[in-house]
């Protein structure tokens, strides 16, 4: 019997995106491990350390309370918004109204989608960094925006070239993504750079969206775009507890902006999710009130790991900038190596270590690799030993 039913096809927007690189590659790594390869993964930036014990205790204590399991406000608990406001005041010197200028998010990745849906019509232009976080591109394509890439290059300190920006079709562009400390290069911004970016956004009526999850990692000077006077009129800043508080799986983040922008994003968010689990919000508020010693202890751990990651880069013949911030190390591959992808695969299959090739972050990352610091010193030392042994075969 002939099947005469009409063929079902997905939405056309799926033609513009591919499965996330790490989703595919981690399946490959899992397959290699199933064959007994014992792959050491230095690819993903997912913290391997737990949150502070008091944060976990708060989560446990709140979970057994009878009022913990109902729907919660999609704007988040008042004490959570106040916690974010106090955190911004204490660490960035930025004053925010917790009632109208802060919106908790289910992770920054989700926030990228909420912001894009709130500001971009199909065909609107969006400025994206090259190299940059791949989700900026995939979400922009999913909302059918027109993507325009601005170059970040080593010879320019991985900072925007404002002459290039001014040459873009700025009448078509509505939103610009920036991310400092920059992932994947680890470049720290300055207030002077932020002032120039805010002025650029105001001049051309472009919303500046700053993704700021790495400012506490290996960084003694966390800064916020919102420290620039008047930035909140044109800017949105996202922040997250994933990296700074080892809460990646908890999916707890926030955005801050002026009340009008926040209200527009709330229109999207309130139709997409139904709020956060109350104990998670209570625990997040606890995390936001941790003393400075928490960050010092965390960074002491990352500093020790970073030294071994630098040894790995050196063993691979790669060059790198010691000034990098954040939980990765970004290095340029030797000139005689064909490509970063080829190098990463050689290391994966022969040294049994998974590192990230820079091409996944954009064409300006083609000659670079990235090593994650989200592995113990012992694991990093084992990876170094394997790479040295492979290089001497």
Image (tube, helix red, strand yellow):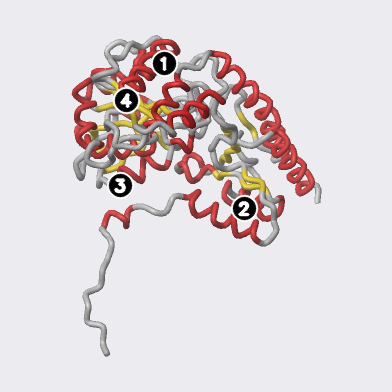
| Residue 302 relative to residue 262: left or right | right
Q: Position of residue 176 (x, y in %)?
A: 31, 31
* Residue carrying label 4: 77
Q: CA distance from mark 1 to mark 3?
A: 33 Å
Label ID, residue 345: 2
Q: Position of residue 355 (x, y in %)?
A: 60, 44
Q: CA distance from mark 4 to mark 3?
A: 33 Å
Q: CA distance from mark 2 to mark 3?
A: 28 Å
Residue at (43, 33) in percent of width and height: 63
Q: Which comes before the other along the chain, label 2 or label 3?
A: 3
Q: Position of residue 93 (x, y in %)?
A: 40, 9
Image quarter where the N terminus lies is: bottom left
Q: Which comes before the other along the chain, label 1 or label 2?
A: 1
Q: Which comes before the other along the chain, label 4 or label 3?
A: 4
Pick whichever, 258 or 84, lies toward us. 84
Label ID, residue 87: 1
Q: CA distance from mark 4 to mark 2?
A: 46 Å
In what element is the residue under mark 1?
helix
């Amino acid at each position: 019997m002939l099947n005469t039913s009409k063929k079902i096809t997905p939405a056309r927007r799926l033609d513009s995106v591919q499965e996330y690189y790490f989703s595919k590659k981690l399946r490959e790594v899992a397959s290699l491990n199933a064959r007994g390869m014992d792959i050491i993964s230095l690819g993903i930036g997912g913290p391997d350390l737990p949150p502070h014990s008091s944060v976990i205790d708060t989560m446990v204590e709140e979970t057994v309370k009878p009022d913990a399991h109902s729907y919660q406000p999609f704007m988040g608990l008042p004490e959570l918004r106040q916690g974010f406001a106090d955190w911004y005041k204490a660490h960035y010197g930025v004053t925010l109204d917790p009632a109208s200028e802060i919106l908790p998010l289910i992770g920054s990745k989700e926030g990228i989608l909420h912001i894009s849906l709130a500001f971009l019509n199909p065909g609107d232009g969006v400025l994206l960094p090259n190299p940059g976080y791949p989700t900026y591109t995939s979400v922009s394509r999913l909302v059918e925006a027109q993507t325009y890439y601005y170059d970040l290059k080593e010879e320019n300190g991985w900072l925007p070239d404002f002459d290039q920006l001014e040459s873009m079709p700025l009448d078509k562009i509505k939103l610009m993504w920036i991310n400092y400390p920059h992932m994947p290069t680890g470049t720290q911004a300055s207030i002077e750079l932020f002032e120039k970016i805010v002025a650029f956004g105001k001049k051309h009526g472009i919303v500046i969206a700053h993704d700021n999850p790495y400012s506490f990692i290996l960084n003694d000077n966390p800064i916020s775009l919102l420290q620039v006077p008047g930035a909140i009129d044109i800017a949105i800043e996202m922040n997250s507890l994933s990296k700074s508080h080892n809460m990646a799986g908890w999916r707890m983040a926030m955005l801050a902006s002026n009340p009008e922008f926040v209200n527009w994003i709330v229109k999207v968010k309130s139709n997409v999710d139904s709020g956060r689990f109350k104990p998670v919000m209570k625990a997040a508020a606890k995390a936001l009130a941790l003393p400075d010693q928490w960050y010092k202890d965390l960074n002491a751990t990352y500093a020790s790991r970073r030294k071994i990651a630098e040894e790995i880069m050196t063993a691979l013949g790669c060059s790198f900038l010691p000034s990098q911030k954040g939980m990765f190390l970004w290095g340029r591959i030797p000139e005689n190596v064909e490509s970063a992808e080829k190098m990463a695969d050689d290391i994966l299959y022969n040294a049994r270590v998974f590192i990230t090739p820079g091409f996944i972050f954009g064409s300006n990352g083609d000659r670079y690799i990235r090593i994650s610091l989200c592995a113990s010193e012992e694991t990093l030392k084992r990876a170094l030993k394997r790479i040295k042994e492979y290089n001497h075969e």
